[in-house]
Image: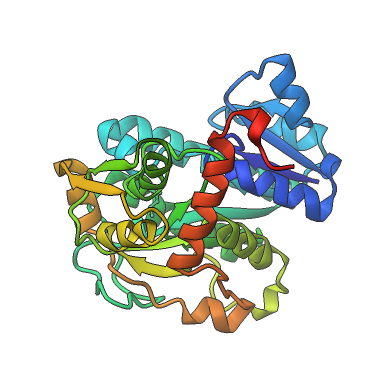
Amino acid sequence: NILVTGALGQIGSELVPALRAEYGRDRVIATDLKVLPPTGAEALAPYDHLDCTDPHQLHEAVRRHDVSTIYHLAALLSASAEAAPQFAWTVNMSSLYNVLEVARGYGCQVFFPSSIGAFGPDTPRDMTPQVTVQRPTTIYGVTKVSGELLCDYYASRFGVDTRGLRLPGLVSYAAAPGGGTTDYAVEMFCHAVRYGQYTCFLAPDTRLDMAYMPDAVDGMMRLMATDAGKLRYRNAYNITAMSVTPEEIAAAIRAHMPGFEIDYEIDPVRQAIADSWPRSLDDSAARADWGWSPKFDLHAMARDMLLRLGEKMKPARQRVE
Ligand code: VAH
């Protein structure tokens, strides 16, 4: 069976349904820190409360649910981590260490989400290579590089089947992200539909890699289903769908909502984080080794986001069946 940690987060909210559609609902156990109310637990069943920093809880969950694959999504994102670096290190690294130790004991496959945040200011910032300098200047990046190295070590030393992706900013409508630097892209769509206006916390020309969540989820599942012999790398493959700026996203929104207005109030902390990251990744290794091929470019993503958010925000009675 498949266990997803951090299942209530931005990625988990779309990965769990996609895994259940592919493998069957009862084979995918959603877990997160929250103890859900009865209706929530029913809707997400099978669901378990799980604190991955507690090795005993993790062992018990993997044993009870006969887990063979773990998607380990539980972590603090870049801005939250920068606000509490000691807590971020403890949560991000002890939870990953526990997952790898349980995987070593039970023979589980492990997915680890790395990030463009695993690169730093002295990494080549345009068409960042698959193998290059990784000296991130954020604690989030330090946990991601450390996580990549720890996963590779468990693969080479103990034969644990660990795999990972360096994820770009992810745009989604199902669940808002929490505490990321690329969250502005999700917020812009939500504010456009709700208010027709957005005040952006990054500068208009801040160029970052992005992908639409359906593509990212498909990429994760495709990577995990690929024959291991085809993988030149384990942790972690660069993937991206587009390299965009706030003003380019705003223009894509305006193509559908001519009156949409954007202004800028820069958050120096998140601007500094974004300025330390690549502007564009070279994801040719992922395309060659296991067929990464995103379907959504900026315009397709904008069209789908505005349609889905429009539906989501309409009063229930008006929703199109
Ligand atoms: C963040 N969304 O902003 C995450 C991600 C590429 C960015 O790691 O922290």
Q: Which residue is depicted at the point 32% across and 65% down?
A: 244
**Residue 197 screen position, x and y as percent:** 29, 41
> 63 or 105, which lies in front?
63
> 102 or 135, which lies in front?
135
Residue furthest toward the top?
37
Vertical relation: 15 (above or below) 219: above
Side of 135 relative to 238 (left or right): left
Give the quarter of the image for residue 199.
Answer: top left
Side of 194 relative to 307 (left or right): left
Q: Is residue 58 visible?
A: no
Vertical relation: 170 (above or below) 194: below
Q: Which residue is depicted at the point 71% across and 51% down?
A: 18
Give the quarter of the image for residue 47.
Answer: top right
Q: Is residue 42 visible?
A: yes
Give the quarter of the image for residue 224.
Answer: bottom right
**Residue 289 screen position, x and y as percent:** 60, 81
* Tally of marks: 0
Vertical relation: 49 (above or below) 170: above
**Colour scheme of the picture:** rainbow
From the image, which quarter does the C terminus lie in? Answer: top right
Side of 51 relative to 248 (left or right): right
> 17 or 76, which lies in front?
17
Side of 57 relative to 170 (left or right): right
Q: Which residue is depicted at the point 37% across and 39% down?
A: 191
Vertical relation: 124 (above or below) 121: below
**Residue 297 screen position, x and y as percent:** 47, 69
**Residue 198 screen position, x and y as percent:** 28, 42
